[in-house]
Image (spheres, rainbow, N blue to C red):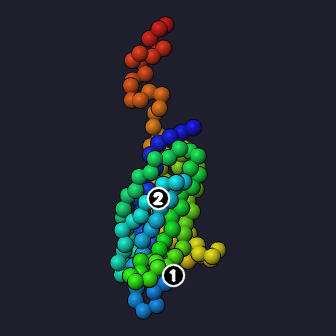
Amino acid sequence: MVHGTLEVLLIGAKGLENTDYLCNMDPYAILKCRSQEQRSSIASGKGSDPEWNESFVFTVSDRATDLVIKLMDSDSGTADDFVGEATIPLEALYTEGSIPPTAYNVVKDEHYCGAIKVGLSFTPEDVRGRGLPEDVGGWKQSH
């Protein structure tokens, strides 16, 4: 099993369905990877095309098969509105190490409602060596 650090660069979204009818919505993202959850800042008044350019770090193993990004609209006085969500598979990331910023579909009730741009990188943690060079105290010395 591989353990390591998943870094998510949340760039922005395009073409989101505006849930506020009188003014531009104030979108934010909730990023969830297994039991870990993090929240972006609110892109106040940015409406359907918000930009965040924020990084988030998760500690993961390859049992974490996907990253879910839920987009919400911050409403003062009432409950925040669900805008849509994107599910990003992580299998390729574990073998590639990084995935450049890519647009992923945002879906609500099985309908396309925009795209979110996200960059990903995975740094495996070397559990065996813990950062020591291979020839220090290892079996390689005993020929």
**Would you call the spot at circle 2 few (<14 residues within 10 Å), some (14-19), or many (20 or more)?**
few
For the residue marked with disc 1, what is the amino acid? Glu
Residue 20 in the image, given as x and y percentages of width and height: 45, 86
Quarter of the image for the N terminus: give it.
top right
Lower position in the chain sequence, tag 1 or tag 2: 1
Element assignment for label 1: loop
Q: Residues within 10 Å of mark 1 (few under 14, many from 20)?
A: some
Q: Is 24 or 39 nearer to us in this picture?
A: 39
**Outermost residue, top side:** 143
Farthest residue to the front: give it: 77
Query: Residue 37, labelled with which disc?
Result: 2
Secondary structure under the numbered disc 2 in the rendered image: strand
Question: Mark 2 belongs to which amino acid?
Answer: Glu
Tell me which residue sits at (55%, 77%) in the image.
113
Residue at the bottom extreme?
22
Residue at image coords 44%, 83%:
78
Q: Quadrant of residue 94?
A: top right
User: Can you give x and y, in whole percent of width and height, for residue 9 in the image?
Assistant: 41, 59
Give the percent coordinates (x, y) of residue 71.
48, 71
Residue nearest the observer in this picture, 114 or 126: 126
Which mark is in front, 1 or 2?
A: 2
Mark 1 lies on residue: 17
Does 49 sit above or below residue 38? below
Rendering coords of residue 114 (x, y %):
53, 75
